[in-house]
Structure formats: C-alpha cells, structure tokens
Amino acid sequence: MDEIVIRGGLRLAGEVEVGGAKNAALPILFASLLTADTCRIRNVPRVVDCVTTERLLEQLGVDVVPNQDGSVVLTAREITSLEAPYDLVKTMRASFLALGPLLARFGEARVATPGGCAIGSRPVNIHLAAFEQMGASIHHSHGYVEARAPRGADGRPRLRGAHITFEMPSVGATENVMMAASLAAGTTVIDNAAREPEIVDLAILLRAMGARIRGEGTSSIEIEGVDELGGCTHSVVPDRIEAGTFLMAAAAAGGDVTVQGARAEHLSAAIELMRRAGVVIDELPDAVRVRSDRRLRAVDVRTAPHPGFPTDLQAQMMALMCFAEGASCITETIFENRFMHVQELVRMGADIRIDGHTAVVHGGKPLEGAPVMATDLRASVCLVVAALGADNTTRLQRVYHLDRGYERLERKLAGIGADIERVSPRPAEAAAPRVEAATDPAARPVSLVPPAGTPRRTSNAS
Ligand code: UD1
C-alpha cells in the first residue's frame, strides 16, 4: 500500500492551484440522472470519490465519458437499473444522493442505507422524512431503502411539492431534496436548508438544466417543479476545503504561498481565525495569499454549518494550533466522533486532551516526525499539515483516505517547496498479506494510481 513520506521543516513558497470541489462535483454528477440529455461538467477533480460516483452511474446505465481536460460528459438516456448497491454506498455515503434524482424522474428507487462511518453514525432520516412529505412511500428492506413516488392526476408516478423544515441544515438532504423537487409537481420550500457554497453550485447547475430555484445560499430555498429538465454545461466551483488546507499547510510550515482559484468569500470563518492566530492573509481577485513566520497564537475554534467554521477544516486547524503558543479549545459540533486524528498528532509529540466534543491543544512545542496512520479523509490531510511543520520525517500510511478527496496532493505541495513523495511498496512487500487492508471497512473501492509494483517517486522533491 502506498505511503506518503514527508521531511518537514521546509518553508513553503510560490503558487498552488486549487481544483474543483469534490463535495460540489458529487451531487452535480448525480444530477445528470434527472435528464435524458447530455450534461457536460467541467473542473471535476480526478479523486476516488468522483470515480466511484461515475462507476455507480455507469451501473445505472448512464453513459459516462471522463476526458483528459477534467471534464466529464454524462448522458442518462437509457437507465437500466434503479438500484444503488451496498458495495458502492458503503464506501461512499454520498451515493445516497442517487435516491432523489431516481425517485423524481422514474418514480422509484432502491438505494442501500449507508451505515456509520469513522466520524459518526450519520443517519439519513432527514432525507427520508422529506421524501415522505413529498408523498413518497419508504420501506426498509434487507439494508436497502425502497422508495416510490405517489401517482399524479395522469396516473404517472410523481413527487409532490411540499413545505419541509429540516431539523438541522443537512448538506446532503438539502441537495437530495433540491434535485427531487426540481421535477416534482408543484412548489417545494426547504426551511433550515444548508447554505454551503456547494449547495449554491448545485442550484446553478439545476437552473442551467431548466429548474426553477431561488434562495440558495440562504436558509430557505424554493423550488418550483418542472415537467422536464434538459442538458447543460457547467464548471464545478473551486474546492474551498482544499484551498483552506493549503492555507493551513503554509501557515504551519511558514512561508509565502498564493492559492490560485481560492475564493476568500467561501473561507471567511477560517481566514478570520487564522488572522487572529497571527497569519497574514491577503484576499486577491481569484486567489488568496498566505504569509506566516510561524509565530502563531492559539485561538479557539468551534465548527458550525456554513458560514461558520467548516468541520472539514477542523483537523487541519488542529494541526496548525499544535504550532501556536498557548491553549486552543477546538469544539466539534457537527459530527460526534471527529477527533480520530488526535492520537496520531499526540504520537508526533502534540499535547492534546479530549473532553467530550472539545479538544484542548497546548501548542508551541516542536512536533517530531513519526510513522502515522490516516483514519479518514480530513484526518489524513491534517497529518500532512502537521508533518510539514514538524522536524524530521513522517511516513503517512493508509493514504487511500487522502486519495478520496485530494488530487495530486503531494505534487502540488512539492511544487511550493515541500519535501514530500509518494512511495509504493517493493514487490515483495506488496505481495505480503496486508491485515489492515482486509479489516478496514473504509478500504477504497477503486484506484487512481497504478497497482503496487516497482518503487517509484511521484514528486521531484527528494
Ligand atoms: C457533507 C459533506 C461532508 C461535510 C458535511 C458537513 C459531502 C459529500 N460531504 O456531508 O464533507 O463534513 O457535509 O459539512 O458533501 N444528519 C442527520 N440526519 C440526516 C442527515 C444528516 O442526523 O438525515 C446529521 C449528520 O449525522 C451530521 C449532520 O447532520 O451530524 C450534518 O450532516 P450533513 O450536513 O448531512 O453531512 P453530509 O451531507 O453527509
């Protein structure tokens, strides 16, 4: 299994380009199910989660053509299956986003229920309650949700518009319902909707397909259903979490880095906290510049739905706080178990105690490189941020977590001066049984990198 090897302590400098947002691309790829026409989606990151989505769509009968230029062309003309199988849903919870579009366009769908995952239980009750309010009948059978739309006046199955109030602003439920409501009979209002930039990007796509939506980006979204949607061309919004990760990496390592494509308005909570911690940040047109001399002050962090501090940057911010003088209280309010990275940071010498949903970081002492293990996507990249600011060498294992959401991370970081490389095991090691791969429920389903074989370097930083 590949490892990422980082020799820390180097200043970062230069420009790094942020890619398309994985969390925007996933619902957008699923939205192609809403029409028989062709959707051309640009700026889709080549990360494992997007490839998994494309595989799932192909299993449903969608014609999917990924191109070298980062675009994906999808045509859902001849759908051959209305089922999202457990094998794919268990590896990527966002597969549940197949439910809304299939139910809305074909009147029925069968989608495996996602179980728990490394960061918490993550139920789908808000999605299902909303579809029931839109008239769907929902049955749970053998680990699957089976949903059917009610019959309309013409006898055809069709969801009905409804006034829905979410008990919490779930990002996935907002997306699922927005897609379904676009083809429902009548108007749907979602109150207490999620306000994330990825929701806004989905609304832009759906409008380009002919949907009537307003209010996206606020907590009340109104969708007037139409009879049919058509094809479109759309470019996925830049990834605010990848951008925020680069800002925190440069702040932890020290240096002067411009993150091209980063949209400061999508990162306002993170930028404000980083400034209070002593990092200099310039908001440029279509870029954000970060300068850090590593003289950092501890700040308290509390995750919250957008526009609050994103839970997807909590782990990276914790790594940054390990280098800041003083005590930082980091409170996670979105997920119940999102401190899996703490033990690995402690193995690098960090002083962190967990008290319920709060981690208290006593920063300012140097971190030391160590062999560490990724447990989930953002936890793994937090260890990269820590390793860049640490002394000596860190070897990060289970990098398939990283590959789910970061495209060419080691090459991008090497491009701004990091000493980082991906190494594959020697053939003898690759052939040996790997216990962790067999037992880890989150083992990735597909690979974007060549199978393990000859040792190779994928960065020029050695
Ligand atoms: C999305 C993001 C993920 C991010 C999260 C919160 C994608 C593919 N993933 O995940 O990276 O960390 O938003 O910003 O976009 N909940 C329920 N019932 C439900 C749905 C959610 O109780 O039916 C709870 C969840 O357990 C969690 C909270 O609501 O505690 C937020 O979850 P949600 O916003 O739905 O996150 P995802 O869409 O799964």
Image (cartoon, helix red, strand yellow):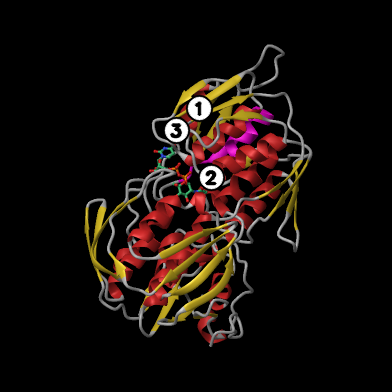
Foreground mark, 1 or 2? 2
* Rendered position, 381 above or below 85: below
As measured in the structure, the alpha-carbon distance from the residue carrying label 1 to the one carrying label 2 is: 16 Å
Question: For the residue marked with disc 3, what is the amino acid?
Answer: Ile
Give SS at disc 1: strand
- Residue at the spot 43% in from the left edge and 54% down from the top edge: 312
State the residue in front, 127 or 391. Answer: 391
State the residue in front, 164 or 331. Answer: 331
Residue 191 vs residue 16: left or right? left
- Ligand 1 is found in which quarter of the picture? top left
Residue 278 vs residue 428: left or right? left
Q: Which residue is mark 2?
A: 197
Q: Which residues are magenta?
A: 98-114
What is the x, y in percent for residue 168?
Answer: 40, 34
Residue 342 vs residue 17: left or right? left
Q: Which residue is mark 3?
A: 126
- CB contact under 8 Å: marks 1 and 2: no
As measured in the structure, the alpha-carbon distance from the residue carrying label 3 to the one carrying label 1 is: 12 Å
Label 2: few (<14), some (14–19) or many (≥20) C-alpha neighbours in 10 Å:
many
Foreground mark, 3 or 1? 1
What is the x, y in percent for residue 41?
Answer: 71, 49
Q: In the image, which disc is placed on residue 190?
A: 1
Q: Is residue 105 magenta?
A: yes
Give SS at disc 2: helix
